[in-house]
Image: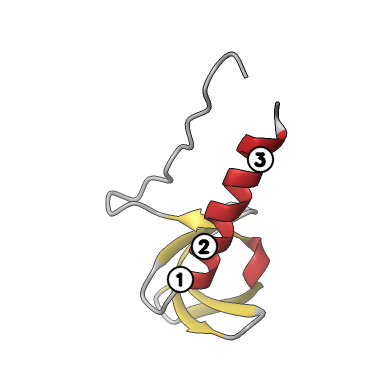
């Protein structure tokens, strides 16, 4: 019963990773917030402060950041 929701989450994350572009605001799995300034097949360059850029693995991106700066919460249904 748990496999279907996990597959759906994985599909949504993969879709987001494929649609990333420069200027998107994202959060990494380590909790770092930044703006995408560069993309390759495996590496994302994030600007985390003015003129401070880091490179992270594309797979370490957890998801987008809302316009208000919050991270979207994925709702889980109770009862399986």
Eyeballing the image, is 2 above or below 35? above
Eyeballing the image, is 26 above or below 66? below
Local SS, label 3? helix
Check disc 1: other Cα within 10 Å, few if <14, some if 14-19, many if 20+. few
Which label sits on residue 15? 2
Q: Residue 62's spot in the image, x, y percent?
A: 57, 55
Q: How is the image coloured?
A: secondary structure
Which label sits on residue 19? 1
Tell me whether the residue at label 1 lies in contact with that at label 2, contact meaning CB atoms closer than 8 angstroms: yes
Mark 3 vs mark 1, CA separation in Å: 20 Å
Labels 3 and 2: the sequence-earlier one? 3
Check disc 3: other Cα within 10 Å, few if <14, some if 14-19, many if 20+. few
Q: Number of numbered discs present? A: 3
From the image, tell me which residue sits under label 3.
6
Eyeballing the image, is 80 above or below 51? above
Q: Residue 80's spot in the image, x, y percent?
A: 62, 19
Tell me whether the residue at label 3 lies in contact with that at label 2, contact meaning CB atoms closer than 8 angstroms: no
Labels 3 and 1: the sequence-earlier one? 3
**Observer-nearest of 25 and 17:** 17
Q: Residue 77's spot in the image, x, y percent?
A: 52, 22
Q: Residue furthest left?
A: 68
């Amino acid at each position: 019963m748990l496999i279907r929701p996990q597959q759906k989450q994985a599909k949504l994350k993969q879709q987001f990773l494929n649609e990333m572009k420069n200027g998107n605001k994202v959060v990494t799995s380590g909790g770092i917030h930044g703006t995408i300034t560069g993309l390759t097949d495996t590496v994302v360059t994030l600007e985390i402060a003015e003129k401070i850029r880091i490179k992270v693995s594309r797979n370490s991106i957890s998801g987008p950041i809302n316009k208000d700066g919050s991270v979207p919460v994925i709702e889980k249904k109770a009862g399986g």
